[in-house]
Amino acid sequence: MKDLIKVDRCYYVHQHFNANYLPVGWLASRIVQPLVDKYELSAFLGMPFNQQLVITQVFAFEKRLSDFHQLGKAQAFNTSAMGKCALAFMDQTVQTDVLKRTNLQAQTKNSLTDQNSLAYSLQNIKDQGYALDDEEVELENRCLAVPVFDEKKQLVGTLGVLGTKTTLQRRKISKLVHDLQIASNQLTGQIFNN
């Protein structure tokens, strides 16, 4: 029973057995779970697929087990930190094509729905190396994401953490970004060097 988690009336297989489309597998747990425990935030791996970002692995913080519901969900690129991060670090040709075909949806009043604002935001994300969404998907929630690359420095996905504005405080962002980037590099090594 330690391999099952119950959330409301649903059961989920514990994250270390979750399959995903990134070739990461259960070994990602030993890289990502320490971040979940240290910062008390849920973590996610996602990958671009069909003009959206799909959540492929969930590492829910024990007080946010409902975050397992995100597994397999698709997010619009323009609303979430993980989606904007993926978009910012895509090959420029692919990014341009995706932007042409993507309808900029609003999840909340804070979502970026203007092409010019989104382009400016994507350049900032690429310059700083991470993306932040402040209540763009859901009010009171904040998400932070970094890219995950392959051995050729091509984007394969994103690693993000989710919390409330209280648990993911702005003053903690630089330290958290540093730790996420280390984890991202370890994931790249795990995926492509084993």
Image: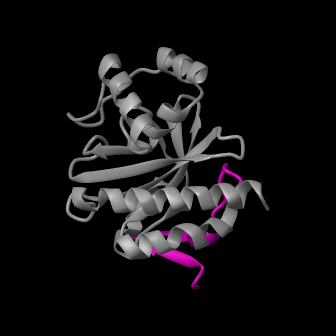
Picture quarter containing residue 80? Answer: top left
Say which residue appears at 52% left-offset and 35% top-offset. Answer: 89
| Residue 10 screen position, x and y as percent | 48, 67
- Splitting the image into 4 quarters, where does residue 135 fall? top left
Q: Is residue 121 above or below residue 47?
A: above
Is 186 rendered above or below residue 52? below
Point out residue 66 in the picture as x, y percentages from the top left corner: 39, 64
The quarter of the image holding the C terminus is bottom right
Q: Is residue 2 magenta?
A: yes
Is residue 9 something one can see in this rendering? Answer: no
Please say whether residue 165 is visible from this viewpoint.
yes
Q: Residue at x 70, y 61 (%)?
A: 190
Along the line of sight, which residue is nearer the eye, 77 or 87? 87
Front residue of 191/43: it is 191
Using the image, determine if residue 141 lies above or below residue 62: above
> Where does the magenta region start and end?
1-23
Q: Is residue 9 magenta?
A: yes
Hey, which residue is sitting farthest bottom in the picture?
A: 1
Q: Residue at x 36, y 57 (%)?
A: 162
111 with respect to 7 (left or right): left
